[in-house]
Image (cartoon, grey):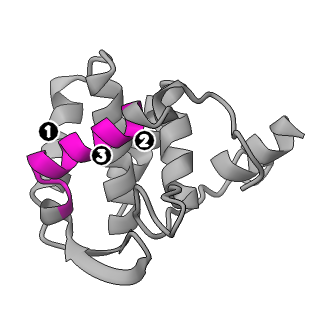
Amino acid sequence: MTFFINSLILGQTNSSSDSTCGVFGIACSIDGAPEKSMLKTILLANRSNKTQLLKWISSDDPQDQIHGYVGLYFMMRNGFHLSNAEKKQMKKVENSEIYVEYCSGCDYGKKEKINVLLAKKRLKIYYSWYTNYGWSGMKNIPYEY
């Protein structure tokens, strides 16, 4: 069952198409759970799957870009090193003024510029949430999502 759930969340199917990320959100809804695409991002970061995160950050889709950025940010904070070219790609996304859809608590459907959502203060909050609530150690889906 775990393989099936991980395959569903990580988009590991026999299909050659990559899954696209949805709404960006760290602690959404009343229970503070991450959005499905954020859960996917966390698993990729925890499994050091830099390849998929780099695909997202290089995507034309800004929803993918923000998820790729946050996943790579988590990896770097966990001690993983990126090349200068990879850091340059992150910087490009970090400075983007394109709007993305995000959630904040129980509020869904909000839109904000990527550079606002990736401000240093917010990144520290995201990482604190990731480490303090046990997401940094997760290698498999803890429940059916």
* Lower sequence index among marks 2 and 1: 2
Query: Which amino acid is tagged 2?
Result: Leu
Q: Residue 33 at x, y = what percent?
A: 53, 56
| Mark 1 element type | helix
Tell me the residue at 37%/47% (across/down): 68
- Look at mark 1 in the image and give the residue it sits on: 88
Do tag 1 and tag 3 residues touch (Cβ < 8 Å)? Answer: no
Quadrant of the drawing holding the C terminus: bottom right
| Foreground: disc 2 or disc 3 | 3
- Look at mark 2 in the image and give the residue it sits on: 53
- Look at mark 3 in the image and give the residue it sits on: 126
* Lower sequence index among marks 2 and 3: 2
Q: Residue 115 at x, y = what percent?
A: 13, 61
In the depicted view, which residue is nearer to us: 34 or 70? 34
| Mark 2 element type | helix
Q: Is residue 19 above or below residue 113?
A: above
* Lower sequence index among marks 1 and 3: 1
Q: Left of 142 or right of it: where is 130?
A: left
The dot on residue 142 is: none
Q: CA distance from mark 2 to mark 3?
A: 17 Å
Query: Which amino acid is tagged 3?
Result: Tyr
Query: Which amino acid is tagged 1?
Result: Lys
Q: Is residue 118 magenta?
A: yes
Q: CA distance from mark 1 to mark 3?
A: 21 Å
